[in-house]
Image: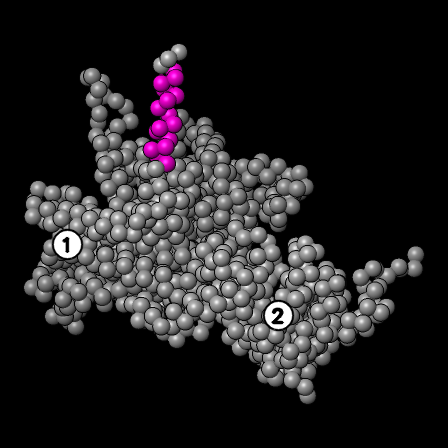
Amino acid sequence: MMKMKKNTKILLSVLILIAAVAALWYLDANKNQYSYAISILQRSAIYAIAAVAMNMLTGFTGLFSLGQAGFMAIGAYTVAILTIPVEMRANVYYINGIADFLANLSLPFWAALILGGVLAALVGFFVGIPVLRLKSDYLAIATLGFSEIIRAIIAAPQLDRITNGSYGLKSIPAFSSVFEAFFIAGICILLMILIINSSYGRAFKAIKEDETAAQAMGINLFKHKSMSFIISCFFTGIAGGLLAVFMRSIDSKTFQIALTYDILLIVVLGGLGSITGSVIGAFLMTAGREWLRFFDNPLMIGGFQVPLFRTGFRMVIFSLILMAVVLYYRKGLFGDKEFTWDRMYNFFIRLRDRIRRKTPEKGDKGNV
Amino acid sequence: MDFAVFLQHCLTGISLGGAYALIAVGYTMVYGILRLINFAHGDIFMMAGYFMVFASSSMPWYLATPIVLIATVILGVLIERAAYKPLRNAPRMSIMISAIGVSYLLQNLATYLFTALPRGYPTLTALKKIFQIGPLSASLVTFITPVLTLALVYVLILLINHSKIGMAMRAVSKDFETAQLMGIKINRVISFTFAIGSLLAAIGSILYFTDRMTVFPFSGALPGLKCFVAAVLGGIGSIPGAMVGGFILGLGETALVAMGYSTFSDAFTFILLIVMLIFRPTGIFGEKVTDKV
Amino acid sequence: MSDQVLSLNDVTMQFGGVVAVNNLSLEVNKGEIVALIGPNGAGKTTAFNVITGVYAPTNGKVSFQGKPIISNFPQGKMKKLYSGENAGKYTELIRKTPDVITKLGVARTFQNIRLFKNLTVFDNVLIAKHMNIKSNVFSATLRLNHKEEQTMRKESMELLEILGLAHLKDEISSSLPYGQQRKLEIARALATKPSLLLLDEPAAGMNPHETHDLTAFIRMLKDDFHLTVLMIEHHMNLVMEISDRIYVLDFGKLIASGTPADIQSNQRVIDAYLGVADDE
């Protein structure tokens, strides 16, 4: 494997970072013109947090949990309830009114976001006690069940004065700047990378590889599994909180199983066990849905309307692509490897060699 | 509560439970053989609903019904061939993800083909006829469902215990590799399992949707998960277990609705699941397995 | 009492009605190399799994350095199914989990090598150093435990050097040749700083030459790391050459114990290995 010089790599990384910040700055300066692009990128960044959190659990600790939507709901509702401006509340809770203790309780966005993460982690702690002893598919179905229970609790009429029941919450203040979502996503993902590469992260990987052997190495399975689960829940909660701010209005239907599946498919697309995969997967998947939008519009070629092209076709194409990845490209984009400049460099070298090898063949054919 | 009202609720619960039981059997059979939670099973059930919508719009019910059953079986077997067979030697998580992918695809396909708006389910007049027994009144389908469920499960158990293919199924579920070495044609057994599972899901869908009146692309998702829970409750892999689990869920859910906690009727299923997994992970009829180190 | 490291008292392990280990008692003293031998299916690995806390025995007690780590008696369904002796002898319920037992100083290898297959050789050893970590997850995440991490890495590297695996440190462990994988498993076990090392068929799959080297290797480990060794092994040459004492199991029962010379001349052992000619 060829290697690049260390300085070149650092330079490239810095350049990419500067380019990204510059691009964001440009988008920010022309907010109105690019609002559509900004919203796609923001949603991607939020999904990226949730996807990396899921990957930490599934790809690195080997715990297949399908509870993402529920934990996102906890974060989202915490942020929404505590940040909707006090003067707007009567309007939001116009049917049942708001619980007295909440009426004037409000927190700054940052505090509410962290509280949302902490609450999700706390629920994760209690949920983890019974379910983390279960084996793979039972764990999946049990966490999925918890996610539905959380959703049912949120929608329960008994909690109308807190969660506004099935009416949902609206008037959630938007991000104060375009940078906010990306900045938070960056910090969250960085923290998770640091955890995964710490001694605790190694213990997680050991558990994924072989539970019996990990235990024989003195690793307390339950402690480390719940640690991974709680941390994952925390960041999932944060992602949920950001989603609430991004969407401006939420209700319990926002957090159906479909949301969990979206995150799962991002993780699979990017590669189980690859953080860069999950991040790139989040952007590809969110943007991909939009790129495929032309499938939803009737297509006319030479006066004929091409059949098939109508509403919903894009999601069919999209799910077929995902199935193709699951079936024929099982490792996803990155497998369990990370993106590195070396790998990128080698990829281009191989590509160049392949093109070079092909060119003379064409030439030969031309001679005949 | 009035005794008659109580009986009426029981009847509704048993009827709903019967439909659940038929779907749960499909889950438990597939899990028994492939150790796979077939997340797409609920969506196969939903597709069966749509098949009926279209079949009955152009033909009488006695022609439409067999066509729906056959179409659903074909769909189920095709899904197995296309999405699970290529992953036979892959880790279990991959197959489970593939199943989620199929579920996603079917839902999107249904949205595309039939739009997201609910479609009216055809009224099968014969099934809708109102019967009056003492203080109880219900449509025929409510009375038929539990009886039909019991009969079908009985036939299925006979089939599994006394036919050649049934023996092969039992062998495969005990030990996949050894069964293969013994010359059992694994793929045929698996296809057969999916065929039966889908057939029962199709019958279940007729019984279920006749009561519900509408079908929409996501109407299979939640019932599907619930029926999986029913299968876990009864002890995954056990057919009588799945049936009992189905009835428990149906009754419990109806009881909650009757008591005015309808928001929790879905959550109830999962609470039951979690309680079960904590205290008796093997379910009512399941056997314990020890991991070998 | 001599310096007893490990003792098993009346350990019985039943899986339903199947008795895998039947009323087994044995002890291992400090500094000894003891071998546990017997035909396939005699219950040797099961005994290891009981000692390390993987299985809870149906009845009996296991002590490590004089303190009980496992103790159990037939309960519930097993009350009826239990077919062994000494049913009423133990009343204490002690069940330390495998990780706790490892922390106390018992390390093991596995019959069917269980490395962390997709991780590097270095990570495999480093993971075994995790159990004594002092810093919590926050300081580890924020890299405030730089010193501790450095020590863990240094110690792991030293181990790899001693075992001659240092040049392979960045290889993925499953890509190593079989003999090296066995060695790495031992390195990983040593990284937990054990006082008792349980080796489950360390010579399995090795060629005669490698097996021969293993004798010196195990002796070296014992001396350099001040270990006591209990091993399961089928290669009789190795067993006879290296062991101070030998226990022989057959159908879960202890049929003989003693020095290599005793065992070699023991008729019951010979019968167990060659099969008794039933009077036909």
Amino acid at pointer 2: Met
Question: Which quadrant, please, contains the N terminus of chain A?
Answer: top left
Give the residue at x 53% y 46%: B34
Query: A298 above or below C48?
Result: above
Magenta stretch bounds = A350-365
Q: Position of residue A197 (x, y in %)?
A: 36, 61
Q: Is residue A42 magenta?
A: no
**Judging from the image, what secondary structure is the residue with disc 2 in?**
helix
Q: Is residue A202 above or below residue A340?
A: below
Residue toward you, A85 or B16: A85
Packing grade of label 1 (10 A; few <14, some 14-19, many >=20) is: some
Please state the chain letter of the residue tagged with numbered disc 1 in the rendered image. Answer: A
**Image check: C165 left or right of C17?**
left
Q: Quadrant of residue C270?
A: bottom right
Q: Amino acid at mark 1?
A: Phe
| Residue C220 numbered mark, or none | 2
Residue A338 locus on image (x, y percent) = 35, 50
Query: Which disc number belongs to residue A179?
Result: 1
Q: Is residue B293 visible?
A: no
Q: Position of residue C33 (x, y in %)?
A: 67, 73
Q: CA distance from mark 2 to mark 1?
A: 61 Å
Foreground: B43 or B158?
B43
SS for tag 1? helix
Which SS type dominates the magenta stretch?
A: helix
Residue visible at 19% across and 17% down?
A303
